[in-house]
Image: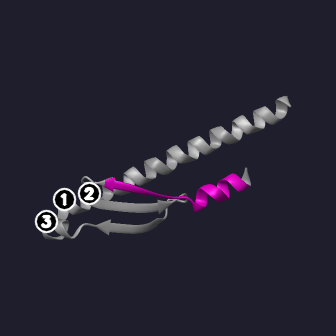
Amino acid sequence: MQKMQEEIAQLEVTGESGAGLVKVTINGAHNCRRVEIDPSLLEDDKEMLEDLVAAAFNDAARRIEETQKEKNGLCILRNAAAAWL
């Protein structure tokens, strides 16, 4: 279980918003690793850009949660299979 938690902590996923114009990459510990903003957005409304960054971060967080659930499910299946053998 600890090994799986370490693997998850080292995962990195990227969330996107604005059709890929804003990208936020976070790791399994939900620490932000990178923010990429298309230069075309720098001339736009500040509030819109803030909303896009927040949406991209939320998308990345959702993706990390999904990955964690998948890995937890695989771990449970492996343990169950080992118990039957």
Query: Label 2: which residue?
Result: 52
Looking at the rendered structure, the kind of residue marked 1 is Met
Q: Secondary structure at mark 2?
A: helix
Q: Write the residue at 24% across / 54% down.
A: 18
Query: Label 1: which residue?
Result: 48
Looking at the rendered structure, the kind of residue marked 2 is Leu
Relative to residue 39, is residue 28 depicted above or below? Answer: above
Query: Is the C-beta separation of discs 1 and 3 under 8 Å?
Result: yes
Magenta-drawn segment: 3-16
Query: Label 3: which residue?
Result: 44
Q: Write the residue at 46% across / 61% down.
A: 26
Query: Is the C-beta separation of discs 2 and 1 under 8 Å?
Result: yes
Disc 1/disc 3 C-alpha distance (Å): 7 Å
Q: Write the residue at 72% across / 55% down.
A: 3
Q: Is residue 78 left or right of residue 66?
A: right
Q: Position of residue 25 (x, y in %)?
A: 43, 62
Q: Position of residue 81 (x, y in %)?
A: 78, 33
Q: Is residue 5 left or right of residue 54?
A: right
Q: Position of residue 16 (x, y in %)?
A: 33, 55
Occupied quadrant, residue 48: bottom left
Relative to residue 38, is residue 79 depicted above or below? Answer: above
Disc 3/disc 2 C-alpha distance (Å): 12 Å
